Image: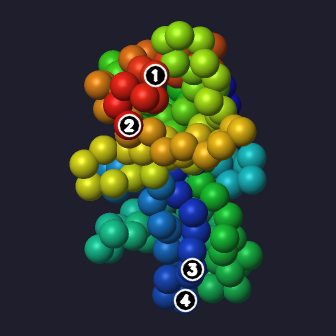
């Protein structure tokens, strides 16, 4: 498993004093209010201010005091260490831990690996790439077991639910 969890991407500057507009990559934007620091390209940066704006976050990071300096960060990702990440409820996983997992059914048939997690209104969908591509709904009737340590997800045989 990765040591860092990506929580957002810097998409633009905000104002003239070095604030950064961030697109959150988390399901709860309010988590940004709790952050004291983030990693940008592996370097720890202290957060000195946070505002929520619609579905975006405006961050003030120590040492970024001008629009010119802020522009250098555009497009970069914000990460937190795994130990400082939000604690998830049982049965919930970070996307970074799901992507790359092998998908097999309970009879041992290998379908491929998860290449992407798609969010829909009702549930997530796992995009599997192998010999063929397959979309699997991430629901308990289909996904029987998730083992991120083994990088393996066990599902019901496709013909039983498709």
Q: Which mark is residue 12?
A: 3
Question: Which tag, 3 or 1, sits closer to the chain's start?
Answer: 3
Residue bearing mark 2? 162
Question: From where the camera sits, is residue 88 visible?
Answer: no
99 or 68, which lies in front?
99
Residue bearing mark 4? 16
52 or 115, which lies in front?
115
Which quadrant is home to the C terminus? Answer: top left
Q: Position of residue 159 (x, y in %)?
A: 43, 29
- The secondary structure type at the circle numbered 1 is loop
Circles 3, 1 touching at the beta carbon (< 8 Å):
no
Q: Nearer the viewer, mark 3 or mark 2?
A: 2
Q: Is residue 38 left or right of residue 48?
A: right
Circles 4, 1 touching at the beta carbon (< 8 Å):
no
Residue bearing mark 1? 157
Residue at image location 29% in from the left, 74% down from the top:
54
């Amino acid at each position: 498993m990765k040591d860092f969890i990506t929580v957002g991407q810097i998409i633009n500057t905000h104002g003239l004093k070095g604030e950064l507009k961030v697109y959150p990559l988390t399901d709860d934007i309010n988590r940004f209010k709790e952050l004291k620091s983030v990693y940008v390209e592996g370097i720890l940066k202290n957060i000195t201010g946070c505002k929520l704006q619609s579905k975006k976050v405006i961050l003030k990071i120590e040492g970024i005091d001008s629009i010119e300096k802020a522009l250098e960060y555009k497009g970069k990702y914000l990460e937190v260490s795994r130990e400082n990440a939000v604690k998830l409820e049982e049965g919930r996983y970070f996307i970074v831990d799901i992507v790359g997992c092998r998908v097999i059914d309970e009879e041992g048939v290998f379908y491929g690996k998860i290449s992407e997690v798609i969010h829909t209104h009702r549930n997530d969908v796992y995009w599997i790439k192998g010999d063929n591509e397959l979309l699997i709904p991430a629901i308990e009737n289909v996904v029987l077991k998730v083992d991120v340590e083994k990088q393996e997800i066990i599902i019901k045989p496709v013909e039983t639910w498709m």
